[in-house]
Image (cartoon, helix red, strand yellow):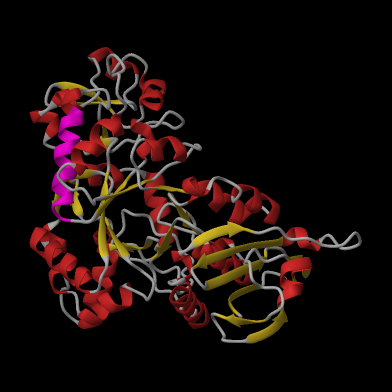
Amino acid sequence: MTVVHEINTLVWLGELSVRHGRRVTLGDVPGSAWDEAVRPGVDTVWLMGVWERSPAGLGIALRDERLLASFREALPDLARADIAGSPYCVRNYVVDAGLGGPEGLAAARAELAARGVRLILDYVPNHVAPDHPWLGERPGCLVRGTPDDLARAPEAYLEAGGQVYARGRDPYFAPWPDVVQLNAFSEELRAAAVDTLVAIGDQADGVRCDMAMLLMNDVFAKTWGDRPGPVPAEDFWPYVIPRVRACHPGLLFVAEAYWDLEWPLQQQGFDHCYDKRLYDRLVHEDAGSVRAHLGADIAYQRKLVRFLENHDEPRAAAVLPVERERAAAVAVATLPGATLWHEGQFEGRRVRLPVFLSRRPREPADESLRDFHDRLLAAVAPVREGDWQLLTCTGWPDNDTHRDLLAWSWTRGQERYLVVINYSDRPAQGRIPLPWPGLRGRSCELTGLLDESTYERDGDELADPGLFVALDAWHWHLVSLSR
């Protein structure tokens, strides 16, 4: 199972430079820093924001009072030097020289590979910076406008090199002021996307595709109508992904996906898609809502990315009480599919840093939370290698708190693991019939994976009526079973 650690590359290197009293680039990160980034259980690192950022996009950001206010809110002592521009306003898919350039990235990838860890980089398929070379060299890759469009809606169009182009957007929000829209229906753009992804594949083991659903034929047509030209017979990703994999068969494709389009994107070739629906249920809803979500087909679930935060979401420690945060972390760490952890999440950082910034505020680390995550990641690494099954919890007529329990099992050969979480703010009790044959007539031992606590139980009882569980609010059992 894929376990990703997302790192804000620019901020991380800046903090390492301060710590070591010298300029640190990707090419000379100390081995100890790589060891810190690659926690036990992590097999993939996402270095977010390595490509050349746009000076033109930065200029637009510096004139945007709304953005500047968000920067000051996150970083009260903000200085001009802290504003680097958006990593999703890409001027060119070349590693920024300030981060170490292509040679530095190659060295970083080698360090990760030596630790058995893959490297993921960003790809932004929907738009480019207003100073991207394609505006002059390959205008056929872009959505074009007319002088009348520009005069009528200057917030939605821009002029560059005597041509009018549409600003990037999605169908539900106003256009983004700092980017130019790529044309998903253009054969020239599709061929160029293949070339770009092949080049990324030369430098990394996977790509995280920003807002991947925006390029789907039906979504793109809804957004742009007939302006980009006729709808191609083949969708964007089924055209692009197989051609890239012809050069890089093992390249991992991860889609940032919303609007319940995860399944179609999986069918179109993605290995993993964001599970935003589970995020919303864990953060805002109850155990019943989470359980309903986990009733989906296992083949679908294995291609989801479970997370509690990323650079687009609020920090988990800022929106969840500490006990609920830990219960949710146990859930995402032990479910089928990929897991995404965000740098700073383990230590309980609370400030969501705008991606435009190169520095973040100092925040005291929650050592207890860090220790919990270290033990959790190491403990679950062998758990998720087998077959997963959602389990049924039962209760009694005068006690319905079993509805607050979430339970599932993992089985690999003779290795058996059980996860039970009370996902509520009250104590819960229930019975959980265990799914494994051969329990009857034996004594069974349950061993906690995080604390090595042990419990002996009768196998007949575990099979029927089931393991008796009594858990305080937001508490859990994460155990292995041996006979």
Task: Look at 31% across and 73% down and name the residue there.
Answer: 37
The spot of residue 398 in percent (x, y) is: 91, 62
Q: In this image, 194 relative to 422: left or right? A: left
Q: Nearer the viewer, residue 300 or 155?
A: 300
Task: Look at 36% across and 69% down and name the residue there.
Answer: 42
Q: Quadrant of the N terminus?
A: bottom left
Q: Quadrant of residue 22?
A: bottom left
Q: In this image, 344 relative to 428: left or right? A: left
Start and end of the magenta stretch?
A: 189-203
Q: Quadrant of residue 432?
A: bottom right
Q: Quadrant of the C terminus?
A: bottom right
Farthest right residue in view: 398
Task: Look at 40% across and 63% down and name the residue there.
Answer: 342
Q: Is residue 129 above or below residue 333?
A: above
Residue 83: say if magenta: no
**Residue 446 seen in this snapshot:** yes
Exactly how many numbered labels are in the figure? Answer: 0
Q: Nearer the viewer, residue 425 or 359?
A: 425
**Residue 471 seen in this snapshot:** no
Q: Quadrant of residue 141?
A: top left
Q: In this image, 381 relative to 165: left or right? A: right
Residue 192: say if magenta: yes
Task: Look at 14% across and 74% down and name the residue there.
Answer: 28
Which secondary structure is most common in the magenta stretch?
helix
